[in-house]
Image (spheres, coloured by chain):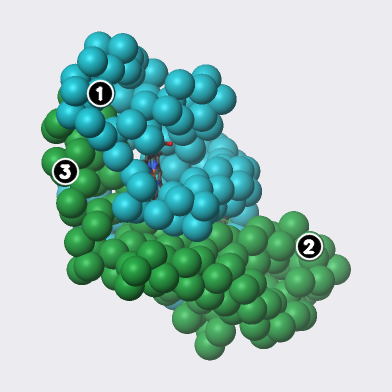
Chain colours: A cyan, B green
Amino acid sequence: MSAPRPRVGRERPAGGFELYSWYFFRISGLLLIFLAITHVVIMHVINTVDEIDWNFVADRWGSPFWRAFDWLMLFLALLHGLNGARLAVDDYIRARGWRIFAHSILWSAAVIFLIIGSIAVLTFDPSAFQAASTAAGS
Amino acid sequence: MTTGTVPTQERGPATAGTRGIAAYRGYRPPVGMLSWALHRITGLGVLLFLLLHIVDIFLVGYGPETFNELLFIYRHPVFRIGEIILVAGLYYHAANGVRIILIDFWEKAYRFERQLFYGVIAVFLAGFLPTAFFMIRAMVR
Ligand code: HEM
Ligand code: HEM
């Protein structure tokens, strides 16, 4: 194995997991342009953070479309981002043991945060709180 | 799986044959280096935010009191500056991501390396300046 060149971006891997990862970065990236930027524009241009509160979210998650939108964004951004962190780990951590350790943390984080995020967006039921929120007058 | 940093197969533009990787200029310094470093930093920064963000949105499920109480964070001036930086990072990462994808799939793109980077900056500014305007306006109001 030759000495690693300074890596400035990278070439398409020859095959296996790295090739799937390479394609996944590009496809999820293109979808995330639409998802994440739309999300930020909704939060900061169409609305402002002063308008965001529990009722705002309950309202938006009343629509299955926005739930699906948020879940897809959750899935893609999380895997794209953590897979990206894996590239950085591979660049900076050379020792085999530490690398396996770091990879385990990243994949565990992927599973845990995917579960937390999915519970939030898929199981949310506003009716359990609606009475309380009108009483609070917000 | 752990060989990601050392390409197993050098891939130059199909027509470049003998020039191989040396012709693959879109990824190389000086412009390639800066754009790549920024790409990595912004990507990791947005990821860090995303992890916190998944936790804060999880609290929506605990009802209005709990969630609304937490929202002072998003409205705090320091955090609002942070949100502007976050948006800058996301927009840069998105614009530069398109540049990377272009270089990957369009054989001749490596010839326009510098122009493409200026294009990234132009697209970034065209998106970021209006967004930042709205964010700052909401902040000072
Ligand atoms: C500071 C800027 C941001 C604000 C104020 C904000 C606000 C919100 C709000 C209110 C929700 C609740 C659901 C909804 O109303 O659609 C949400 C969900 C979500 N946001 Fe953001 N967001 C911001 C930036 C981002 C960024 C940059 C990303 C992408 C990396 C992102 C990814 C997500 C995801 C994945 C969910 C769904 C979470 C879940 O399923 O548990 N957000 N955001
Ligand atoms: C907005 C649309 C986005 C596009 C077009 C995009 C595109 C890309 C591309 C093309 C790569 C290069 C992958 C490779 O070297 O093979 C990449 C890397 C990366 N992305 Fe994204 N991405 C986007 C959003 C995000 C988001 C929301 C996050 C965070 C949650 C993120 C985090 C990362 C990280 C950490 C890397 C690894 C950088 C490195 O270590 O070299 N990206 N992205």
Chain under callout 1: A
Foreground tag (1 vs 3): 1
Q: Is residue A63 rendered to the left or right of residue B21?
A: left
Please, what secondary structure does the residue beneath circle 3 have? helix
B114 vs A15: above or below: below
Please, what secondary structure does the residue beneath circle 1 have? helix
- Earlier sequence position, callout 2 versus callout 3: 3
B35 vs B71: above or below: below
Which image quarter holds the C terminus of chain A?
top left
Q: Is residue B117 visible in this depiction of the protein? A: no
Q: Position of residue B30 (x, y in %)?
A: 53, 88
Q: Amino acid at mark 3?
A: Leu
Q: Position of residue B108 (x, y in %)?
A: 81, 71
Which image quarter holds the N terminus of chain A?
bottom left
Marks 1/2: CA–CA distance: 56 Å
| Residue farthest toward the right in the current orientation of the protein | B15
Q: Amino acid at mark 1?
A: Thr
Foreground tag (1 vs 2): 1
Check whether the beta carbons of the residues at disc 1 and disc 2 lie within 8 A of each other: no
Of residue B60 and residue B121, the one placed in the foreground of this image is B60
Q: Residues within 10 Å of mark 2 (few under 14, many from 20)?
A: few
* Residue denoted by label 2: B106
Q: Is residue A33 rendered to the left or right of residue B43?
A: right
Check whether the beta carbons of the residues at disc 1 and disc 3 lie within 8 A of each other: no
* Residue denoted by label 3: B70
Q: Is residue B76 visible in this depiction of the protein? A: yes
Name the residue rendered at 56%, 25% in the picture: A65
Q: Indicate which disc residue A134 carries.
A: 1
Q: Amino acid at mark 2?
A: Trp
Of residue A92 and residue B131, the one placed in the foreground of this image is B131
User: Where on the picture, by quarter, is residue A112?
Assistant: top left
User: Where on the picture, by quarter, is residue A77?
Assistant: top left
